[in-house]
Amino acid sequence: MVQLHVKRGEESQFLLDTTVDVSVETLIEQIAAIYNGRLKVERICSEIQELAEHGITLPPNMQGLTDDQIEDLKLRDEWADKCVPSGGAHIKKDEIGRRNGHAPNDKMRDVLKKTVEEAKSLVSKKQVDAKVCVTMDMVKEALDQLRGAVMIVYPMGLPSHDPIRMEFENQEDLSGTHASLQVIPVEEAQLWWAAKELQKGKKLQDYVGKNEKTKIIVKIQKRGQGAPAREPLVGPEEQKQMMLHYYRRQEELKKLDEADDDSYLQSEWSDRQALKRQFQGLTNIKWGPR
């Protein structure tokens, strides 16, 4: 299997196993799906952490308003009575006024947070260092874990306007957000390797040959952004080892310089004639009156 190290810019994303016979179109679809799926998992995890702390989101027309403003406008959250967390809720006000402040109890909050950590680790960028390839099945498993945890805490479901529910139903609206800049639609995705764009209509073997044990770094980005920066000749880890070697060499040279010090030649034990004088009885001779 060919192992692809997928990056966006200089940042590692994940590892993917494939074959040299795969078409570039299929490869782009696979990589874009995993890349965008990981972003979805991260977005949901972020929202679930807020859900665990402050409860469900308020209706859009109530978000950001103070209690007095809500009372003056006579607004009411109809979902507050429908979406009560299992085991009851405790009040924890959301200072930014985005959620209703009816948070799950400690036990249910732990369920949400533990599941978030498990899902994030499943598709984490750290899997690159662990030499673990990420697949679309792993992304789906992470989403299923998150969906299951939310159903345990909120068996009646979440409000239709809640971003977590919208993400699960693929109805999320990311327009005007930073997250929208990270997503790469499949139709706009490009793959680059060795400063060359992998052209649709070709196969991977047209670029890397037929060796199935090949390991390469590919970069994904949106169409129209130009060629990404080439990979440095020396990676961060190799550079670190080189600097460590240089430092050790400098320390060795310092010790050698100290070892070259010839001041010891003035010491008594280094006198080559000392033994001869001792046999001749010429040691400890002092000049001057007694």
Image: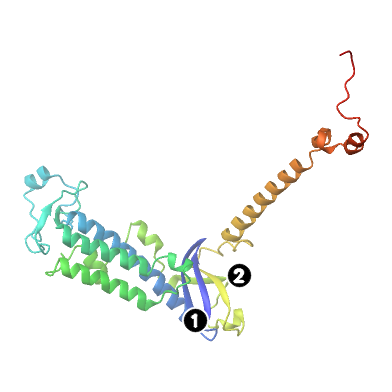
**Residue type, numbered disc 1:** Thr
CA neighbours of label 2 inside 10 A, class few (<14), some (14 to 19), many (20+): some
Q: Considering depth in this image, is 250 or 73 the residue closer to the camera?
A: 250
Residue at 91 percent across and 31 percent down: it is: 281
Residue at 62 percent across and 82 percent down: it is: 209
The residue indicated by pointer 2 is: 194
Residue 75 x/y as whole percent: 8, 52
Q: Considering depth in this image, is 107 or 11 the residue closer to the camera?
A: 107
The residue indicated by pointer 1 is: 18
Circle 1: element type = strand
Residue 175 x/y as whole percent: 32, 60
- The mark closer to the camera, 2 or 1, is 1
Q: Is residue 122 left or right of residue 74?
A: right
Residue at 40 percent across and 77 percent down: it is: 135
**Residue type, numbered disc 2:** Ala
Q: In this view, does 10 lie to the left or right of 65?
A: right
